[in-house]
Amino acid sequence: MTPIIIDSKGPPIGSVIFLHGLGADGFDFQEIFTRLQFNKIRFILPHATYQPITINQGFEMRAWYDLYDLSLEKDEDEIGMKRSSVFIYQLIEEQISLGIDSNKIIIGGFSQGAVMSFYLGLRYQKKLGGIAALSGYLPLKEKLLNPIQNDLINIPIFMAHGLYDNVINITIANNSFEKLSNKFNSTNFEKYEMGHEICEKEIDDLSIFFNQSLNK
């Protein structure tokens, strides 16, 4: 399924590839990113493929990787993350071929898409413009962080989470933030009076992060 493209008004200041959550699709954020506050940015909203999900009794749905356990005590589906990353990296390379520098490309997402944004942004061979993770967490424990060095530690990171999230507990997000703060120079974590969802204040904070990061 072809990704949704929301083009900017005039030449884009950068591109954002934003990944949906489990069981959703790229249309989830289409209305949000057509708002005026985002109109200087090009958005690419891809759709994950359908696959059986272990935590949902093997029911097939759109997903970037299989999910075994929300406590994250079991192994994570790194093979699935790697498989999906091939497609997303192609989208990044496509933006570069259109004249967008890698440091003007932000990778972001919600929930499972947020997890993928960390996996993608911290493994890409060039420094990207930022990572935006909404209602997610850092996957694979220290495995993603240990190899990172040089200018990659300066990548801007925006995390956001609901204080009453009953899908991904705020404690999991807090632990991720602590690990990231110990490694990176520009990590911001905003918390909101909400559950596993999006709120207006979060959208405003996200637009500030996008515009400031891409205008540097």
Image (cartoon, rainbow, N blue to C red):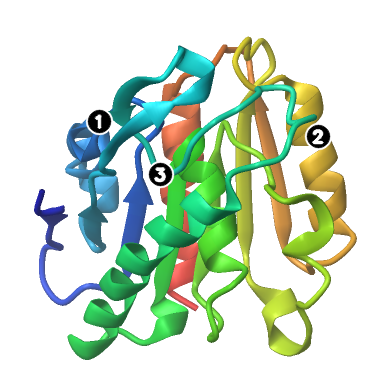
Q: Secondary structure at mark 1?
A: helix
N-terminal of the two: label 1 or label 2? 1
Left or right side of 55 for 63: left
Q: Secondary structure at mark 3?
A: loop
Q: Nearer the viewer, mark 3 or mark 1?
A: 3
Q: Residue at x 53, y 86 (%)?
A: 126
Figure check: 78 above or below 34: below
Figure check: 156 above or below 164: below
The reply to whether callout 3 and callout 1 are in contact (CB within 8 Å) is: no
The amino acid beneath tag 1 is Asp
The amino acid beneath tag 3 is Trp
In the rendered image, residue 91, in percent from the top left (x then y), is placed at 27, 70
| Residue topped by disc 1 | 28
Q: Is residue 71 visible?
A: yes
In the foreground, 57 or 29: 57
Left or right side of 167 for 42: left
In the rendered image, residue 21, in percent from the top left (x then y), is placed at 40, 32
| Residue topped by disc 2 | 174
| Residue topped by disc 3 | 64
N-terminal of the two: label 3 or label 1? 1
The reply to whether callout 2 and callout 3 are in contact (CB within 8 Å) is: no
In the rendered image, residue 65, in percent from the top left (x then y), is placed at 46, 42
